[in-house]
Amino acid sequence: VQLQASGGGSVQAGDSLTLSCVASGRTFTRYTMAWFRQAPGAEREFVASITPAGTSTNYKDSLEGRFTISRDNVKNMIRLKMNNLTPEDTAVYYCAAASRTTIFGSDWSSTKGTQYDYWGQGTQVTVSS
């Protein structure tokens, strides 16, 4: 699957921004999807994930409540709605897809980038104070 992220930009602190990631191919519903980000000089970190049917989500603890991940399986798309942005949210945001979807019969998700098989090119988010 190929992933194309978009929606980044330069905003002020307190603003909102929604990122989108469109996946190619016909098997989008077979993938667990996620967003990661990488700030300058920092390691890539997990932001949020969503199961294939969109029934379960997981967030980096400090972002839950401000960020919302969603998916549209008709449009082969995931989104990341980010509210009340701060300069600490400045980073390149990447969408990712994992072929693994279940574990012992339950929904699977992971916060580890190494567990994801496909990556988009990234979209820059810059938040000014």
Image (cartoon, helix red, strand yellow):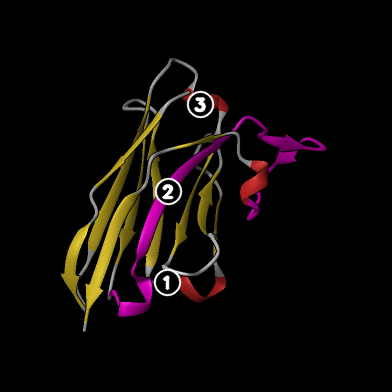
Q: In the shown orientation, is residue 55 left or right of residue 105?
A: left
User: In the picture, which quadrant includes the C terminus?
Assistant: bottom left
- Which residue shows up at 38% across the image and 40% down it? 121
Q: Which amino acid does label 1 sit on?
A: Gly
- The disc, 2 or 1, on the residue closer to the chain's N-terminal end is 1
**Magenta residue check for 47:** no
Q: In the shown orientation, is residue 103 left or right of residue 79?
A: right
Q: Is mark 3 on a helix, strand or loop?
A: helix
Do we see residue 58 in this rendering? yes
**Mark 1 — residue?**
65
Q: What residue type is labelled 3?
A: Thr
Real-space Cα separation, disc 3 to disc 2, in angstroms: 19 Å
**Mark 2 — residue?**
94
Relative to 52, say whether 65 is above or below: below
**Mark 3 — residue?**
29
**Magenta residue check for 105:** yes
- The disc, 3 or 2, on the residue closer to the chain's N-terminal end is 3
Numbered label attached to residue 24: none
Pick the residue in front: 62 or 42: 42
- The disc, 3 or 1, on the residue closer to the chain's N-terminal end is 3
Magenta residues span 85-112
- Which residue shows up at 61% across the image and 40% down it? 116
Point out residue 9 in the picture as x, y percentages from the top left corner.
19, 58
User: Please, which residue is most extreme toward the front here?
Assistant: 41
Real-space Cα separation, disc 2 to disc 1, in angstroms: 20 Å
**Front tag of 3 and 2:** 2
Q: In the shown orientation, is residue 10 left or right of residue 37?
A: left
